[in-house]
Image (cartoon, rainbow, N blue to C red):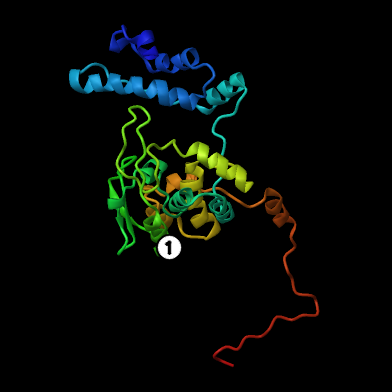
């Protein structure tokens, strides 16, 4: 509605990309440029281009905010954006599970093992489990169709052991269908996870860094799995995307610099290279 208050009466042909981008500072002065793009530019542009498709009105293309615009807005609001996420480690997962209840322990293990999104995880119902083949059905999301993914026998054992719960719809109060993890929304886990992390003495991680970020970093950075294989297992269509966003370097910078000061191992003057026999010998 605030967007309509600003441009709702304007002819579509007179609305430019620069105009849409300028609304961010007016409507959300304390937000970052990524939020402006997601909550102002993208929905307004979608409406305008939908009209183009159906009515032939002008098509609108908008250039993204560049890094200079992003940095300038961060300086104005005195808060950095695009803070690098910290991926979960095996130690973090084990500490979380030791302090958590069976439902949340299974939830975090499931996302760490499969790279499932939180919305996909909390939507899993009892009929979405195939214990005989260790398969779990996850719903369609982010351009990927619904499908079955394979989990470890240990993971399937944890899922089957959970008694499904019927969460409430927070808006209507109506009971939802039974859910394996007991949550009715993708945000319902937050407060519980904060309590578990505090009890375990570990930093709080939300579902995304604990799951997808932890999954890709664990496989590619820590275990050396090739990015193509890891991307396919995590259901990324382009390996370049997770390499750019989900792979986090874990080598200490001082360690890297020290490598340039390490001398090569060279033979002493008294040592002679060993003679290797040839076919002629």
Q: Is residue 243 visible?
A: no
Q: Is residue 105 above or below residue 223?
A: above
Q: Which image quarter is the N terminus in?
A: top left
Quadrant assignment, res 130: bottom left
Describe the element under mark 1 as helix, strand or loop.
Answer: helix
> Observer-nearest residue: 182 or 6?
182
Q: How many marks?
A: 1
Q: Which image quarter is the C terminus in?
A: bottom right
Residue located at (23% from left, 19% from top)? 51
The extreme top residue here reads 9
> Observer-nearest residue: 276 or 52?
52
Q: Is residue 96 visible?
A: yes
Report which residue position mark 1 lands on. Answer: 154
Q: Is residue 276 above or below residue 31?
A: below
> Observer-nearest residue: 58 or 272?
58
Q: Is residue 92 above or below residue 84?
A: below
Q: Position of residue 202 (x, y in %)?
A: 62, 46
Asked if residue 241 lies left or right of residue 79, the reply is left
Q: Position of residue 149 (x, y in %)?
A: 33, 55
> Observer-nearest residue: 98 or 136?
98
Q: Position of residue 163 (x, y in %)?
A: 37, 52
The extreme bottom residue here reads 281
Residue located at (75% from left, 56% from top)? 261
Asked if residue 41 lies left or right of residue 84, the reply is left
Instruction: Using a 10 Å C-alpha cutoff, classify the residue at mark 1 as few (fewer than 14 neighbours), some (14 to 19) or many (20 or more).
Output: few
Residue located at (37% from left, 24% from top)? 42
Quadrant assignment, res 158: bottom left
Q: Position of residue 206 (x, y in %)?
A: 51, 40
């Amino acid at each position: 509605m605030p967007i309509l208050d600003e441009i709702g009466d304007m002819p579509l042909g007179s609305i430019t990309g620069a105009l849409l981008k300028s609304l961010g500072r007016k409507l959300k002065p304390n937000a970052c440029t990524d939020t402006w793009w997601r909550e102002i530019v993208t929905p307004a542009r979608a409406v305008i281009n939908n009209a183009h498709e159906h009515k032939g009105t002008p098509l609108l293309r908008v250039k993204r905010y560049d890094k200079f615009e992003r940095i300038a807005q961060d300086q104005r609001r005195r808060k950095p954006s695009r803070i690098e996420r910290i991926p979960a480690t095996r130690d973090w997962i084990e500490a979380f599970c030791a302090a958590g209840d069976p439902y949340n322990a299974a939830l975090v293990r499931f996302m760490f093992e499969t790279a499932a999104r939180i919305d996909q995880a909390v939507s899993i119902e009892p009929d979405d489990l195939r214990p005989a083949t260790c398969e779990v059905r996850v719903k369609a999301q982010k351009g990927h169709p619904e499908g079955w993914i394979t989990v470890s026998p240990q993971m399937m054992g944890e899922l089957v052991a959970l008694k499904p719960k019927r969460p409430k719809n927070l808006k209507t109060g109506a009971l939802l269908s039974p859910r394996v993890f007991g949550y009715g929304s993708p945000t319902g886990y937050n407060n519980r996870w904060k309590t578990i992390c505090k009890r375990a003495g570990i930093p709080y991680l939300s579902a995304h860094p604990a799951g997808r970020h932890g999954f890709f970093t664990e496989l590619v950075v820590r275990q050396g799995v090739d990015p193509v294989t890891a991307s396919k297992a995590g259901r990324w269509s382009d390996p370049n995307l997770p390499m750019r966003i989900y792979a986090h370097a874990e080598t200490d910078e001082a360690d890297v610099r020290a490598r340039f000061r390490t001398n090569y191992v060279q033979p002493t003057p008294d040592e002679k290279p060993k003679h290797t026999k040839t076919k002629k010998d």
